[in-house]
Image (spheres, rainbow, N blue to C red):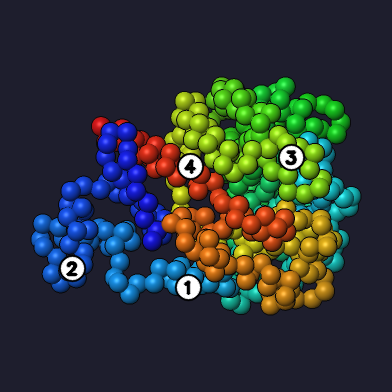
Amino acid sequence: MFNEYMIADDGVKLAFNSFSCGLAVVDDTYEKLISLLPELNPGNVPPEIRECFDAAVEGHFILDDDYDELLELKTKRNFQKFNNESLGITIAPTLACNFKCTYCYETSKPGIMDPSVAQALVAFLESQSSHLKNFGVSWYGGEPLLAKQTIYDLSEKFIEICNEKQIEYSAFIISNGSLLDDDTIKKLIEYKVGGIQITIDGPPEIHDKRRVNKSGVGTFDLIIDNINKLLRTEKIEVVIRINVDKTNNNDVEELLSILSQRLISKKIKISFGQVTAYTDACRSIESSCYNNGEFAIQLLKYYGYLGKYGFADYNEFPYPDTKLNYCCAELMNSFVVDHEGFLYKCWNEVGNTENSVGNITEGIYDVTSYKNGRWLNRNPIDDEKCSNCSLLPVCMGGCPHNDMVLNRKHVCDLIKYNIRDVMLTYYNLSKENEK
């Protein structure tokens, strides 16, 4: 039920299976195999089609008659969802920010995380440590580097516990990049921050209008200089995010051209973000946002730019993978915490305390609460429309926030709209690489 077939420009027939994410050329041997399926079993496959048969089974293109694909998908999804060997926390030590971006969905709040909230987070990690193998932290905001000392203090405690309990520790930070002086970068390395995401939204004149510094001073050149500082260390992986809507879509290529000239290394990840009016705070920009179908069409164009300006070697082709659970919001052992200790399942809800699922200072977080359960029990496999879709494993019902908070049903993931173009482009690239 998860097979998709398409014809390439050279007339070759392709098959894609969204459960295995396998892509195959459909030749005469496969066609013969399909014609013989009613009378075949693993023990009576003719030698001339055995290799094709084994490959088709491995790629989920053919299955036993009693194979229940939806049940297996649901089982794998639950196994991942309720796995307690990994813990992921996104921490916003402050919701204050030194920028006032035009599309920001957050309502800025003053203040930095109180020590009592930090202590509760440390206590929570300790309470979970006996069964953990992995613990990952994402530092978030606001601008998290406005609360540097909180990051340093918490990181020290987290690393100490993980070392003692032999838990693998990892950390990532999402920043606007304006506060990255030499000392801060050294501290981030010391406290095992392995990656950083910094947003640049276009050439200088575009970026400085969209990502507005509250002081009124442009930040494009400063951010480029700070990214180069990071690249010189070779200790922190840099992800440059480009948030795109209809107002700066035509500036993406120029930005990549500038980056190719001004960055000292092209060993960076580049992520293209779809600007979306998730909350009332950013509702005014809704008319300039692409919907999923529109944005999906743009993505392959952006990937072409990466190749043109030398960034493709460090950026994987946007080939789909099986999601099982769409994002961390659907995982039992993953949540977001703000500086006041409120807990959320989704990053888009940070600061909106009405939609919090608890508070870390009230004691050990109850993963079985009904508020948490609303997210954990969302299941597109039980939805009639989704369960009959051949792309369910790579879409998984789309963003849970649309469904759970905005009440937008069946907002499919981007791959739903560009699957054919993605597969055909990948096939053509594979052919070129074989030459």
- Give the labeled residue for mark 3: 286
Q: CA distance from mark 2 to mark 4?
A: 35 Å
Label 1 vs 3, first from the N-terminus:
1
Q: CA distance from mark 4 to mark 3?
A: 22 Å
- Is residue 118 visible in this depiction of the protein? no
In the displayed orientation, state which residue is furthest to the left: 47
Is the residue 201 above or below the residue 422 in the image?
Answer: above
- Mark 3 secondary-structure assignment: helix
Q: Residue 20, percent across and down?
A: 38, 58
In the displayed orientation, state which residue is furthest to the right: 110
- Give the labeled residue for mark 2: 40
- Mark 1 secondary-structure assignment: helix
- Give the labeled residue for mark 4: 418
- Mark 2 secondary-structure assignment: loop
Q: CA distance from mark 1 to mark 3?
A: 38 Å
Label 3 vs 2, first from the N-terminus:
2
Q: Residue at x 75, y 33 (%)?
A: 211
Q: CA distance from mark 3 to mark 2?
A: 55 Å
The quarter of the rendered structure image containing the C terminus is top left
Crowding at label 2, few (<14), some or many (≥20) Cα neighbours within 10 Å? some
Q: Residue at x 58, y 76 (%)?
A: 131
Label 1 vs 4, first from the N-terminus:
1
**What amino acid does circle 1 point to?**
Thr
Label 4 vs 3, first from the N-terminus:
3
In the image, which disc is placed on residue 75? 1
